[in-house]
Every structure is written in C-alpha cells, then in structure tokens.
Amino acid sequence: MNNTTIECFLLTAHCRDNGNRFEITLWGASSSGERVRIFIDDFRPLFFCPRSVPASETAAASERKQLSMRSFDGGDVDCLYFANYSLMQQAAKRLKSARHTVFESDVSPMWRYLMERMVSGSMVVTGTPGRFGQFVNFTNPRLRGGAFTPKLEVMAVCVDGVDGEAISKIACVDEAQSHVFADRDERRLLVDFLAYTQERDPDIIIGWKVIDNALKTIRERCEANGVPFEPGREKGSRVTSSQYNRSWRGNDYPRTVWTARIPGRAVIDVPAMLRGYHHSPDEYQPDFSDCLTGARSIFDIFNRAEILQNAIERSKRSGQTLDSAGGSVASFDHLYLPRLHRAGYVAGDTADIVPPSQPLLGGHVLEPAPGLYENVLVFDFKSLYPSIIMTFMIDPLGFRVRDGDRVSNPMGSSFSKNHSLMPEIIRELLAARAVAAEQKNPYLSTAIKLMMNSFAGVMGATGCRFFSEHVSAAITGTGRYILKASIEHIENVCGKKVIYGDTDSIFVNLGAGMEDGADKIGKEISTETGVWLKEYLSEKFGVQSALELKYENHYRRFFIPSLRSGDTNQGTKKHYCGATIDKDGAIELTFRGMESARSDWTDLAKDFQRELFIKFFSGQPLEDYILTTVSLVQKGKFDERLIYKKRMRKSIDSYTVNIPPHVQAAKLSDSPARLIKYCITQSGPQPLEKLTAPLDYQHYIDSQLRPIADSILLWMGTDFDKITSGQQDLFG
C-alpha cells in the first residue's frame, strides 16, 4: 500500500525497552474518526557529553557523533546514541560518577521524539497503514506537528466498594447511555465491565479520584479473581504507585502518587483537572448517593467545567497529554529545547542546578492605605512578565551567550539581542492568542495565557533545567521597577493618589464626586502612562516597549481593611472589597483575599460579609443587622449554614501533633472523604454525617462573625464586642 497522510490527535504515549530495542507506542484519534496506533522502534535514546570525554568512557553507546553544537559555557559537545533506554541511563550514571558533565540525560526519549518533531497534541502522520485488530496501525511513520482538533468519546466510571473488599457495583456513563454492573458474582461483574469498556471504546476514562480509587480497586479485584486487567486498546494496562516526600510549611510528609497506564485511553481525574484549570473542586461536588448517580454527576461536572475543551487546547500548545493537570516545567522544555538545539546549543541536567543562595524576590506589593474610598480606578499591566521578556530580550540562552549586541535591564543584567529564544516564543503565543480571540475560542486563549504566565515562574524554579536566579531576577525585578516607576508617574504627572499596587495592578483613588467622569479619566491615565513608559524605556534602556497598561475597572466604593492587630494605620496586603454600582443602584461586590473569597469559611460567614458590606457601602447602619444575625445564630436558625468544608492535604495518620479540627472530625467518620464537611459542637469538631452534640454557637459568633464585622467596625472606631455587649437578652 502507498504512503498515506492522516491527521491525528495524541491520546496516550508509552515507551519501553524490548530486549535490545527501544519502543514507543502512540495512540491517536484521527480526522477520519478511526483510532490509530503508531509504533516506533527505529528511534535511539540519546544524550550529550563534552567532546573532551575520552572515547573509552562512552563505549556503551552504539554511536558517538560529533555535532556542531555547544553547551551554555561554549564547549563543544558530542551526541551519544544507545540501543535502549536502560543502556542510556546506565551510561549517564557512569559518566556522572566519573565526574563528567552530561547534558539532557534526564530528558525522556519518548518526549524528545515528539518535541523534536514539534508534535503538540495534534500531529500529521505519513506512512504505510496496516491493521492492529480493529484499529489502523503505522510502524515507523514520519511525524510532524499539526493543528487538528478531535471529537473524543468520554466515559465516566464510579465504583461502589470498600477498599480491600469485593466490588458490589460499577457504573459507567457516556454521552449516549449509562449502565450499572451489579452481579453477586464479582468475577462476572469485572469480566462484564471490561467487555463493556471494549465495546463502548471510549477515548477518555474519567472519575473522581479515578486512579487511586476506581481503577486501583478494579485492578486489585481483578487480581484477586484471576481476571486480566486489560481495559485498554491493547495489552499492558496497569495502575502503579510511587512514594515521595512533599514539603509543606517547612516539614516533609510522605506522599503516595498513583498513575494509570491504559494504552489508547487517556485517564482524567476530574478533581485534579479542576484544580489545574483554577476551579475549586469544592464548587463541583458529585452526588454519590448511589453508584449510578455518582457516575452521572461526574460526567456532568466534567462537561460543565469544560475540562475536555481546555485539555485539548492546552495539549495543542504545551505538548503534554490530555491527562496532564500541571507540567509547567515539561511544557517549557517541550517548547524551548527544540529551538535551543536548532540554535546550536544543548541544555544541562536538572540535577546539576545550583539552588539560589537566598529566596528569590517576587513582585512588588505597595503598602496599602486602609480605609473606605470612593471612585477607585484599577489598572493592570497586560501580561506583565511575558511583556517584560519581550521588551528586554530576557532568555536563558541569551543570558549565557557573550556577544556585543546586548540589551540591559533595570536589574543591571543584560541579554543577547541575537541569541535570545524566549521573546520569539512569547510573540508566537501572543499571536496565537489573538487568533483565538478572533475565532472566539476561550479555551485556547486560556491555555496560552496560563502557559505564558507560568514561564517566569518556571525559570525561577530549581526543578527546571533552565533555572537561573539572574534570569528570574531580571523578570521579577524589572516588574518591580516598572510598577514603582508607573506609580510615581501617575501620582506626580497625573495628580492622582495611588492607594495600592500589587505586582501588575495599580489602584488609583479619584475621590468623592468623580463617578461621572471616572471612565474617561481611567482611559486618559492608561493612554498617557503607556506613551510615557514607552518613551522612558526607550530613552533609558534603548528598548521598544511591549508593555501595555490597561484600564480595567471603576469601583464606586472600595475598602481596604486594617491589620487584625487593630493598627488602623496599616492595611492588609492582597485583601480588599470593591463595589460597582449600576445605573439602577444595584451593587456588585468583588472580594480579594477576604472570607467570601475563601472556600473554607462557612456559608453563614460569606453571606454575613456580603450583606454587611452592601449596608456599609450604602451608608446604612450596621448595628441592628449584626445583633439580629447573632441572635438568629443563638436560636439555631442558621444551623444548615454553619458547615465547614476543608480538604485533607495528607493522610489522617500523618497528623500526630496539633491535629486541626477537620482532621479531628475525619477521625470520627466511618469513611472519611478527601473533602471533610464538619461542624464545631459543644463536644468539639464532628463530621456532618455523625453529629451527636449541640452546635457550639459561641464558637461561630467568635470565629466567623466577629472577625468579619471587626474588619469594618475597627475602622469606624468601634468593634463587635461593644455592639453586642449588654445585648444578651436578645440572644435567648
């Protein structure tokens, strides 16, 4: 059969050593609707070493080739090719132990194969097609990047069974139908479920803790019943775990990470993806009243949160597979390494990164002036850090290459104009985002925004092979410089007082009586400051500014609380409430960093804060509302709104000292979930499903109502206790 070219979208990617060969297996969804298996066994794992390394030290390589490539320090390098991955790893370990430097020995050969062909999610496959069962198969075809967007089939799975015991039910839900497997014979249940999965043939399996709960349990019960665990499109499915220590507030905690390998089917854990796309899983709680309802609920959440659309577009930009919820460092490698190689350079190993001598500084945060303001304008630098990278040519390679044509920045470092790669990557992403906006594709726009904003953080992370405290400082330090200079300009030239600033945002106070002309003034400040900044940076640093200060919002009322210590002269950073008021007088509140913006405060606290601020901004008295709310709490009228929700960050057994309330409640639960719902009772914290004692109303008054009320009252010269003292007759 002649060569055929098809477009595919990557579903899964796996690799292995098979004897003396290295194999890669890719599965994709094609534009024709068929599912495609791509098998590669003609790619050799590789890494680089200095040319000065003696040939005797690299004898394990099947080939050593001189390249016209250099390391960041300018040394010539050779490429070492190996028959399989194991030999490559052993050779790298031996060279390191002999104190030789190696380059990119920690890059997965499978991901190297894809990134060097510019494959990011979508790919164009050219080769001679064959068959692999019911699927199309290509062996060693030619791959290159594409732009295809697939239509994928999704199946939600929910398991009813206690860990270590027999499964009683498995529910499956997809777009067309749902099914529950409930057989007294567990072995028959498992066999039927696996057969059903092959029949429905989903591209993606989703669930709530789908790997370390549903699939782990199914795999364990298959093993106990002698049933082959093969839910994939070919053999080789497995669910495995690995251990590592997670640092949390200065302490290390052991953590188990579960991964699933289901050939041909992506596995997506819905809570992990919600967090990855900046949703709170607490906002999307499934109904697990029964197994089928749970599966339907998971499927609905997956669609409502638009996880698939976001995952597809993120994959098309980052090169990561659909099931990846993070991977900023991997995404950076995927975009940067191929360009670095084409520029004639190789990168080091991540293990060789030298940690910074002291913590790296972040963005500038202006000391906020607490109080109530009228007509506050908010300005944001659009994509501040990406714009700084473009303006000042900031780049890992550009920093290390020594040439005469360089760009200096406010931090005193400089970068090559001709060898910097990151500015062009950012320009390409910005252009793609503009196209996404024209095509009304919010998923692609969001994916690009998240990637660009992560790059500055990645270059300041020691887990990234391109980490450099000088490169990171050039970005964040220049950001601080620009924010401070812009604030000074607005106050001196525009004659307006800046009451707060944070990294890329500036808050300007106009004062009373300025509401009618606020938008006009905001646009004028934005335009004038942008023109000034462009001229200033050109004159001082000789650069063409890509920075843009946007006028974002006009808050008719704006409040910055004082520190909880009671010092009314010092405001709380990253905490404020702003109110926009429409022509009909309707108030819409925006909270940042305050209780209403946090998921672990009770619904009563959030409602109380919102109503209190509406009255405060409207000039209404607060005392009667506070007293009435306290009275109704004492009378038990708000019991259903006094529920705490807190997520478990580690296993219950890990808490041995200073056990927090949600863990105390979890210890009393028959089957504690990751999200603990509990109340504070007169007998201490108790889980919602096992409340045995009366609620401790005084706790809620002291811990939920008092701090919220005092954030306003202290500024007004009074406090919660003064208002409520002597009013106990109202509480009876």
Image: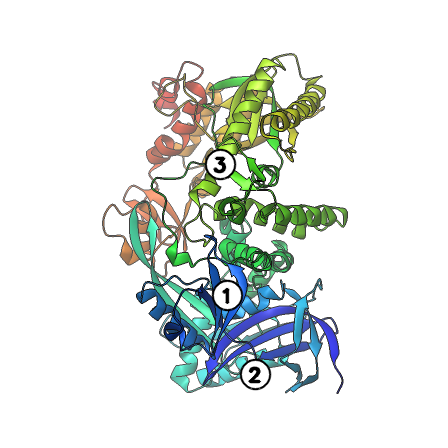
> Residue under circle 1?
290
- Tell me which residue sits at (36%, 61%) in the image: 671
Instruction: State which mark lies toward you, 1 or 3.
Output: 3
**Amino acid at dot 3:** Ser
Q: Is residue 574 above or below residue 267?
A: above
Asked if the residue under mark 2 is in contact with the one under mark 1, i.e. CB atoms within 8 Å, the reply is: no
> Label 1 neighbourhood size at 10 Å, few (<14), some (14-19), many (20+)?
few
Q: First in sequence, mark 1 or 2: give its number.
A: 2
Asked if the residue under mark 3 is in contact with the one under mark 2, i.e. CB atoms within 8 Å, the reply is: no
Quadrant that contains the C terminus: top left
Q: Whole-percent x and y of residue 550?
A: 65, 30
**Amino acid at dot 2:** Ala
> Residue under circle 3?
413
**Amino acid at dot 1:** Asp
> Label 2 neighbourhood size at 10 Å, few (<14), some (14-19), many (20+)?
some
Numbered badge on residue 195: 2
Q: Nearer the viewer, residue 74 or 470?
A: 74
Instruction: State which mark lies toward you, 2 or 3.
Output: 3
- Tell me which residue sits at (53%, 33%) in the image: 409
Occupied quadrant, residue 535:
top right
